[in-house]
Image (spheres, grey):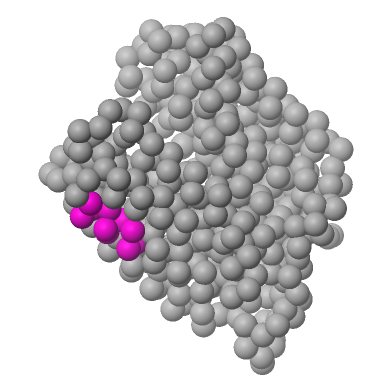
Amino acid sequence: MNSPFQGLPRDVAVLVAVAVAVAVGFGVVAPAIPEFARSFGVGKTAAGAVISAFALMRFVSALGGGRLVDAFGERVILASGIGIVAVSTGLAGLAQNYPQLLILRGIGGIGSAMFTVAASALLFRVVEGSSRGRASGLFQSGFLIGGLLGPLAGGFLTDYSLRLPFYVYAVSLIAAGGIGFRFLSSTRARSAAVTADSDGPEEQEMPVTSVAEAWSHPAYRAAVVANFATGWTLFGVRMSLVPLFVTEGMLQRPVWTGAGFLCSSVAQALLLVVAGRYVDRRGRKPAIIVGSLVCGLGYLILATSTWLPAFLVAMSAIGVGGAFLGTGPGAVVGDVMRGRGGRVVAVFQMSSDLGAITGPLAAGFLADSVSFSSAFWLCAGVLFTVTALALRMPESIDR
């Protein structure tokens, strides 16, 4: 049986391994964060603000991280970003009061933005267009696998000590960052300026794609909107509103929330590599159309039914659509880049973060003031807007 990494640069395998380590660590610390914040005597809103501070700083610092990538290279910024998250997380475990914890988690968000932008920019740059979808799928699967494994270990560690998960995450990040920097720095990148047969150093002068150049491509604009929709529906509303829908809208036990998320995650994990191959063979445009349609249909089912089997089918459909939306738009970004494109990747990443911030607010407002159904109809509308844009976009891959 052929390895899924066959024919890809070694960078891809290293980036996937780093993604697994980072996601496992984040999953380990996630259950402890609100409980640790509450241990300082603050309310639920303040505890939630610790999580929001990380997300907010990721969003506002992403473009700056992109500029650093263009100026100093992906590998340096990737390692630096992981280092910032590691140090701030370790210090957060030592925090003696709530303001210290809040500030340190905000600093961690800056490092997370640097890592994410640098890793994605490197992945898009070193992989040829004919394999970019498969590489994106593998990279996303690393985060998904880590995200499934981390919370389980984090729950046990949190029961033992609220501070221990922070230390475990910090140590794992230091190891992941060091290994990533060591192995990535010894591999040449494929680019317009440096090829696999080049004798020159990787960090020699190479072209940089500006945001204006990328934005002039209709495919890039469609990819940015698709990533906004992904943040809105998959990272935002799915996490914030679906659990409430299960208990308050369907009148089911919380265990069915876990079952629904398991269906979604398993479907997405099983199809990510398949979706990546589809992106490379059939094109980015068909993948975005399929992903947005299937995911949108999943939200339509949620909007029109409170039947438990229908809920599980809907969550599975959202996972299937997420696999295609997690690979197609990213491959488009790689297609429009020439040389480095840190800021191009940063804008793409910021669109997802913006969706994850605004989606729960808008959908939550509709759920409170109208109904859960109206909130899910809105999500379906956002996704079908992506379908309409994708139908009009040109194919970005060179064949």
Taking the image as shown, residue 204 lies to the left or right of residue 144, namely right
Residue 87 inside the magenta-drawn segment: yes
Give the prevailing secondary structure in the magenta stretch. helix
Residue 60 in percent (x, y) is at 56, 49
- Give the percent coordinates (x, y) of residue 200: 66, 91
Q: Residue at x 51, y 19 (%)?
A: 364
Taking 52 as reference, is 109 above or below it?
below
Asked whether, in this view, residue 20 is left or right of residue 313, the answer is left
| Residue drawn at the location 15% of the way across and 40% of the way down | 159
Q: Which residues are magenta?
A: 86-95
Residue at screen point 79% across, 38% down: 390
Does 156 sit above or below residue 21? above
Residue 132 pos. (x, y %): 67, 59
Q: Quadrant of the C terminus?
A: bottom right
Residue 234 image offset from top left, x and y in percent: 54, 34
Determine if residue 297 is in view.
Answer: no
- Residue placed furthest toward the bottom: 199
